[in-house]
Image: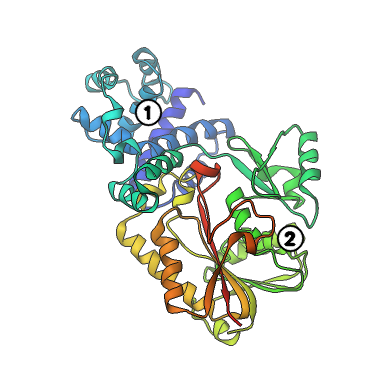
C-alpha cells in the first residue's frame, strides 16, 4: 500500500474505534483479518497513526474546538499529521482522492491546517494538555499530588517498549540474551527484574523460534516484579486467583521450579483455555486450571484456610497500561471505576479466606490510581485485623524497592504502571 492509502485505512479504523465500545487492538485485528491484502509493514504504519491519534485525542479535540470545529476521524488524523510536521503541500499529496487515498482537502480543512500553527498547546487545560478525561486528571492528582500527577500523565503518553521474561525452566536470562543476539536481535537487560530483557518499540517476537520453544514469554517488567513478590520455595501450594491469560501463572511456575502445587483460577473459560497451550510450551508440569462460577465458588469454600500463597491480580482500570492501550482511557467512566473497586473488594475478601495461618496473599493491579490500590488495602485491613502488611524488601529478598507496597510507573521506572501489596495472615 502507498502511504496515502495507509492514511485512509487509519481514518477508517479510527472511525470504527469511535463507534464501538471495543478495545482498539481487537478492532484492528478484525479489520485486518477481513482485508488480507494489507501487509505487515502496512499494518505497522496504520497502527502507529491510529494509536497516536488515540493517545493525543484530547489535545486534538481541544485544538479543533479552538477553531470552531467538531471532531471527526478524518479531522483527528489530519490534525495529527499537521501537528507532527506535515505541511499543507505534503497533506495535499496525501489527501488527493486518487488510488485509495483520502478525498482531497476542502476549503475548511486547508484553512484548519494553516491555522493550527497558531494554536498554543501550552495554554490548553490540563485534560487536553495530558490528553485524558477531566475526571481522570482529578484522580491522578488525588493519587500523586499536583506535580506528581503532571509527571505521571506525561509518562502515560509515551510509547512503550517490549519486555520479555526468560523462562528459567528452560534457560537463563544470560543464555537467552546470547541466543537472541545470534539471531540478529539486540535486547538490553531490564533494570529491575532479574529475568527480563528489553527491546525498543514493538517487536514481532511471537513468531521467533525461541518463543515457540518456550524460552521466553512477552511480559512487561512490571508484571515480572509482581511475581518476584511471590517467589515461594519449591513445594509450596500457590493459587493464582485471577489467572486471566496466565502470564503470572507461568512466572510463578518457573520460580517454583516446577515443584509444589500451582492452581490457576478464573471465571472466564475462554481465557483459561488459552493458558493450557502456554503451560505446555513453557514446560510447566505443576499447574492445573480451574474454572470458577464466581469469586464465591464452592472451590473457594472447600479450600478455605489451606493455601500458603494466593495471588490476586484483580480486574482493574488498566490505567498502568494506557501507553499500550491509549483508547482505554477514553472508554473508562466514573461508574465503571466504582464498579471495579466493588469487584476488587469482593475478590480480595473471598481470596483471603483461602490463606492458611502464617500464609500470605499478594494483591496486585495494573492501575495507577489510589482508589484501586492503597485505598483497597486500607479498607481490607480495617475489616481483616488478622492480616498485616509485609514490607516489599522482606517479601522479596534483594528487592531494589522498599516500603509497605510496590508502585512502579511509566514516568518513574519506565515500565507499565503496577501496584502490589503483600498481606500475611497471622498465626
Residue 31 position within the rendered picture, expressed as x and y whole percent measured from the top left: 47, 43
Above or below, comparing residue 376 to residue 159 in the picture = below
Estimate how packed mark 1 is, as few (under 14), some (14 to 19) or many (20 or more) residues with alpha carbons within 10 Å.
Answer: many
Which residue is outermost to the bottom? 302
Q: Quickly name the residue at label 2.
A: 254
User: Where 301 falls versus 423 (above or below)?
Assistant: below
Task: Note whether 204 is above or below 254 in the view shown.
Answer: above
Let me know if residue 20 appears in the view.
no
Of the image marks 2 and 1, the number of the one nearer the N terminus: 1
Q: Is residue 406 left or right of residue 113?
A: right
| Residue for point 56% across, 82% down | 300
Local crowd at mark 2 within 10 Å, few (<14), some, or many (≥20)?
many
- Toward the top, the furthest residue is 89
Per the model, the C-alpha gap separating discs 2 and 1 is 44 Å
Q: Is residue 156 left or right of residue 77?
A: right
Asked where in the image residue 271 lies, by quadrant, the reply is bottom right
- In this view of the protein, which residue sits in the foreground, 422 or 199? 422
Callout 1: SS: helix
Scheme of image coloration? rainbow
Q: Which mark is residue 80?
A: 1
Picture residue at 39% right of the left edge, 39% below the top: 54
Residue 110 at x, y = what percent? 27, 18
Report how many numbered discs are placed on residues in the image.
2
Q: Is residue 306 left or right of residue 43?
A: right
Of all residues, the one furthest to the left in this rendering is 68
* Rendered location of residue 221, percent (x, y): 61, 48
SS type, badge 2: helix
Which of the 4 quarters of the picture holds residue 251? bottom right
Amino acid at each position: 500500500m502507498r502511504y496515502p492509502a495507509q492514511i485512509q485505512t487509519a481514518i477508517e479504523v479510527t472511525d470504527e474505534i469511535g463507534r464501538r465500545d471495543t478495545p482498539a487492538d481487537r478492532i484492528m485485528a478484525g479489520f485486518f483479518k477481513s482485508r488480507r491484502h494489507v501487509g505487515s509493514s502496512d499494518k505497522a504504519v496504520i497502527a502507529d497513526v491510529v494509536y497516536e491519534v488515540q493517545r493525543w485525542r484530547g489535545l486534538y479535540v481541544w485544538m479543533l474546538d479552538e477553531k470552531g470545529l467538531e471532531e471527526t476521524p478524518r479531522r483527528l488524523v489530519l490534525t495529527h499529521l499537521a501537528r507532527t510536521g506535515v505541511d499543507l503541500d505534503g497533506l495535499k499529496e496525501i489527501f488527493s482522492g486518487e488510488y485509495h487515498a483520502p478525498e482531497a482537502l476542502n476549503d475548511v480543512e486547508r484553512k484548519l491546517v494553516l491555522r493550527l500553527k497558531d494554536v498554543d498547546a501550552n495554554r490548553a487545560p490540563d485534560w487536553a494538555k495530558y490528553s485524558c478525561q477531566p475526571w481522570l486528571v482529578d484522580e491522578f492528582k488525588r493519587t500523586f499530588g499536583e506535580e506528581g500527577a503532571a509527571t505521571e500523565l506525561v509518562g502515560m503518553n509515551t510509547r512503550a517498549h517490549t519486555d520479555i521474561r526468560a523462562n528459567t525452566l528452560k534457560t537463563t536470562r544470560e543464555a537467552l540474551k546470547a541466543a537472541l543476539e545470534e539471531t540478529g536481535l539486540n535486547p538490553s537487560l531490564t533494570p529491575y527484574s532479574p529475568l527480563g530483557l528489553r527491546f525498543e518499540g514493538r517487536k514481532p517476537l511471537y513468531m521467533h523460534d525461541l518463543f515457540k520453544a518456550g524460552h521466553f514469554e512477552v511480559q512487561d517488567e512490571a508484571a515480572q516484579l509482581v511475581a518476584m513478590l511471590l517467589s515461594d520455595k519449591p513445594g509450596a501450594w500457590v493459587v493464582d486467583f485471577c489467572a486471566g491469560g496466565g502470564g503470572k501463572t507461568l512466572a510463578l511456575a518457573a520460580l517454583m521450579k516446577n515443584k509444589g502445587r500451582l492452581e490457576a483460577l478464573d471465571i472466564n473459560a475462554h481465557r483459561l483455555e488459552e493458558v493450557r497451550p502456554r503451560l505446555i510450551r513453557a514446560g510447566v508440569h505443576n499447574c492445573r486450571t480451574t474454572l470458577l462460577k464466581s469469586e464465591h465458588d464452592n472451590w473457594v469454600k472447600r479450600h478455605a484456610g489451606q493455601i500458603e500463597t494466593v495471588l490476586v491480580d484483580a480486574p482493574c482500570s488498566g490505567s498502568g497500561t494506557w501507553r499500550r492501550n491509549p483508547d482505554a482511557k477514553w472508554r473508562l467512566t466514573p461508574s465503571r471505576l466504582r464498579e471495579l473497586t466493588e469487584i476488587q473488594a469482593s475478590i480480595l475478601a473471598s481470596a483471603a479466606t483461602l490463606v492458611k495461618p502464617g500464609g500470605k496473599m499478594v494483591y496486585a493491579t495494573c492501575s495507577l490510581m489510589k482508589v484501586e490500590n492503597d485505598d483497597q488495602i486500607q479498607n481490607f485491613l480495617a475489616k481483616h485485623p488478622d492480616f498485616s502488611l509485609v514490607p516489599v524488601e522482606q517479601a522479596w529478598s534483594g528487592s531494589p524497592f522498599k516500603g509497605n507496597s510496590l508502585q512502579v510507573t511509566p514516568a518513574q521506572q519506565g515500565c507499565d504502571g503496577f501496584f502490589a501489596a503483600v498481606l500475611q495472615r497471622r498465626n
